[in-house]
Image: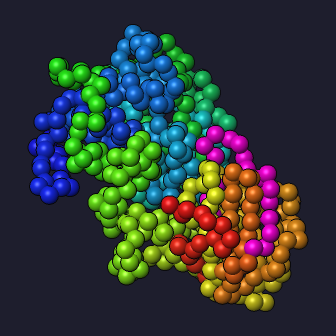
Amino acid sequence: MNDKFCTVRGHCAHPRHYSISQLPFGVQFNIFSYLGIPDILSARECCKYWKALADSDYVWKILVRIHFDVKTEAGVPIKTSWRQYFWSRIKCFDRMRQTKGMVISENGRTVHSTGTVKKWATASIGYPYLKTGVHYCEFMIDKCLKGYLQRTWKMIIGIVSKSFVYMSGKYVGCDDHSFGYIAQTGEKIGGGQSPKEYALAYGENDRIGVLVNMIKEEISFYRNGVNMGVAFTQFGSGTHISQYHFAISFIKSNMYATVLPLAKCPADTDVSKAATISPKKTIIPSNFSLKSCPDDIKLSILGIMNSDGWNLMRKINHNWKQLAESDYLWRERVQMQFSDVGNLLDTRDSAPWRSLFYRHCRRFSVTHCTPGLAVSNDCLTLTSTDRISYWAAARVEYPRMTSGSHYLEFRIDKYRHGSIGNTWKVVCGIVSDSFDYQLTKWVGVDEKSFGYIAQNGNRVGPSCKNQGLEYAEPYEEDDCIGILVDLERDELFFYKNGVNMGMAFQNFRHREKNFAYYFAVSIARWGMEVSVIPDARCPDRDIDIV
């Protein structure tokens, strides 16, 4: 991207066009400080000028303060730049470099495969870029399935090239420019070669380190701190590949791994630090106030954020609140987010675009659902196909419930009678971030999920020992089931056709940091259909869905 095309679209009677390089340096730094880590890494690839801005100490000083709660006023804690200090403490998975079906945690350090992964899926570490020098990265295997995956390699840890294709079926070591260490057999694979004997196998709770020496062109692997020896030599010779990334591949679902950002190489090796580029000098102080910027520049800052960022910016002051709620921003977001935008416009009336977005963004997730469940094009309807042999589950992508009160309704469109036998058929409720979308899982099966059973009207959760306890009336086809989650009072209620069935659970909330719940539904067997009603209102409480 050339800097001269990075213009700001005006939102006034006489639009003005700016090049970002014409803004004061303090404003440029402020814009970059609002970006997330993946966005900063993408921005520095645009051009040399943006790379200098993205590498500036002003930006990374703010990021250090946010991520590590370090008092930056005391100066750099070590003899290096703030960017070097940041990357010496953090490595995270890159959301732009992962196969569909892989889920990365909010802090970017843990990745797991969901039920949509049918073959191989891969995720790579965004930083460091393996171009020159010596680099080390270590992974903790949190969960590695046994049993039905016994004849597979399970997972592979290693490196991939910048041009690696993150599509289903691709794994570390599958092409000429990726190299890996196989979990099940302990073999090495890569460079277009078949697997070869290398070292010990590894599995759950093992720590696997990868040491890449770009100077000697050598790759070594470590298992629980023990060097397994050099696995590959001259891996970059005679190729056009200029950059590699640490990566991990899983086969099928329910595999978990965490990158250990502070892990040091057990060997006495000079592992490379992040290079830094100083921005151009300026007489404008780096703490230049955004108050002096016109609204169209502020809108450009908001334009590079997601909707969660806009809601945070609303809390700064009245001016930012007006900008963050403007139709100028939310209209484009609605058009990007929803395929059925024409139908939404018919129901819009005079409502602001922000209200329209939040009224209709409650839709089924296509990544957090069991294989065999079919999600409609508008993501409002969930159908169980004949691939479902037992239980299948799917969650609603929004809201991510961490505080406050939330309400949502499901409608049972198709309900099978009799032919399924003595089962619960449908369970509506809530699940946690860590819910496992396997074929045998239903809402209420673990200690962090809670549900309302269709067949008998019982409630199910951790205190019910998966048996269900007497609660309310059963429900079936054409019934609407509402769920009220009050995280402030720690209470969970269910509704049937607008009637409150009473409190189902109390003191259920987990107190872990950043813990979140999602609305979800489980279906037993095939031939069932459930829809989410995105703009449903709680019958007896005034809850702001925005």
Instruction: Left or right? Give the position of 466 relative to 341.
Output: right
Figure quadrant of residue 351: bottom left
Q: Residue 144: horizontal and vertical position, in percent?
A: 65, 46
Whether residue 375 is visible here, answered yes or no, is no
Q: Position of residue 180 (x, y in %)?
A: 47, 40
Say if the magenta span includes residue 508: yes
Residue that appears at 75% across and 57% down: 491
Pick whichever, 512 or 487, lies toward us.
487
Q: Quadrant of residue 421?
A: bottom right
Residue lying at 38% horizontally and 78% vertically, measured from the top left: 349
Q: Is residue 352 above or below residue 52?
A: below
124 shown above or below 88: below
* Nearer-the-camera pick, 340 or 537: 537
Going 30% across and 25% down the picture, which residue do you hit? 287
Q: Is residue 506 visible?
A: yes
Image position of 463 (left or right of 376): right
Residue at the front extreme, as displayed: 318
Identify which residue, 117 or 486, lies in the foreground. 486
At 33% across and 68% down in the image, what residue appears?
A: 335
Question: How many marks do you count on the picture?
Answer: 0
Q: Quadrant of the N terminus?
A: top left
Measuring from the top left, give residue 212's x and y in whole percent.
41, 27
Segment colored magenta: 500-519
Between residue 131 and residue 465, name the one nearer to us.
465
Q: Is residue 484 above or below residue 7?
A: below
Q: Is 60 drawn above or below residue 20 in the view shown? A: above
List x then y, in percent, for residue 202: 63, 38
Residue at the farthest top position:
79
